[in-house]
Amino acid sequence: DFSKYKIVVLPAYNISSESDAVRLEEFVKGGGTVVVTFRSGNRDEYNKINGLTIPGYFKEICGINVINYDAVGSNRRGITGITGLLNADTWCDLIDQKDSIVIAEYNDGFYKGSPCITKNQYRNGAVYYIGTHLDRDGYNGFFDYISAHADVRRCPIGPVSGVETVTWEDSGNTCVFVMNHLNTAVYVPLDRDYTEMIMDKKVSSTLRLEPYGVAVLQ
């Protein structure tokens, strides 16, 4: 059920189906935001190539066609777009923007000036297509941009490398789960004073988490 989400992300969603496309189209019509990445939509649910031009089942909501591609491996390609100068590697789609608007393009290689990230305003929602693999800074900047446009609130804590934060709300109560995925202790800056619910203690300014430690803040 997509209705409880503001953004749905399809990372290299290669194996998919027509029913996926229908559900996503309804989600976007209702005002949702979808992010589709390269190599999505060209195989059916049985892993059989469907013969459709990439992005396959999602062509209509993306409003584009991929007319060619370049598997660049670890070779970096430069990109310029709404979030500044970025680096790409692994894969570079060459995109016919058709009904969409271009929000980033390649700035080197034989595809210099060609679109690589697009946005399609579809009914009441929006669909973004990322035709390449960005580095971490690139993805962070891009998702900051679309989160703001989709009215998604960021977690007030972090970010810290290796630490995951998740905000949970129920019946007017809000908690933040903070999870350390590293085998070393971490220090997480806090935006205000909290009660750490597992140990039932007050924390302020900074939270120290043991290796693979978890805290629940309220």
Image (tube, rainbow, N blue to C red):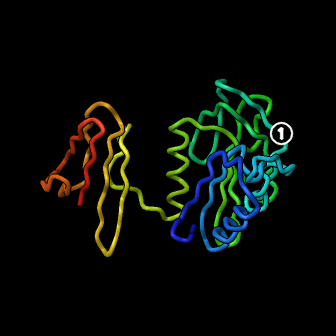
Q: Is residue 139 left or right of residue 65?
A: left
Q: Is residue 204 left or right of residue 186?
A: left
How many labels, in total?
Answer: 1
Amino acid residing under circle 1: Asn
Q: Which residue is mark 1?
A: 68
Q: Nearer the viewer, residue 107 or 25?
A: 25
Picture layout, residue 47 above or below residue 3? above
Q: Please rate how many residues cluster around mark 1, counting C-alpha atoms within 10 Å: few if below 14, some from 14 to 19, many from 20.
A: few
Q: In the rendering, at what x and y percent does residue 146 appear? A: 55, 56
Which quarter of the figure has residue 197? bottom left
Q: Nearer the viewer, residue 218 or 95?
A: 218
In which quadrant of the rendered image does the C terminus lie?
bottom left
In which quadrant of the rendered image does the N terminus lie?
bottom right
Q: Is residue 113 left or right of residue 153?
A: right
Q: Nearer the viewer, residue 67 or 214?
A: 214
Which quarter of the figure has residue 163? top left
Which quarter of the figure has residue 99? bottom right
| Furthest-front residue in this view | 46
Please name the residue shown 30% across and 74% down the image. Answer: 172
Please name the residue shown 72% across and 62% down the image. Answer: 21
> Can residue 193 be seen here?
no
Please name the residue shown 79% across and 37% down the image. Answer: 69
Q: In the rendering, at what x and y percent does residue 93 appear? A: 75, 40
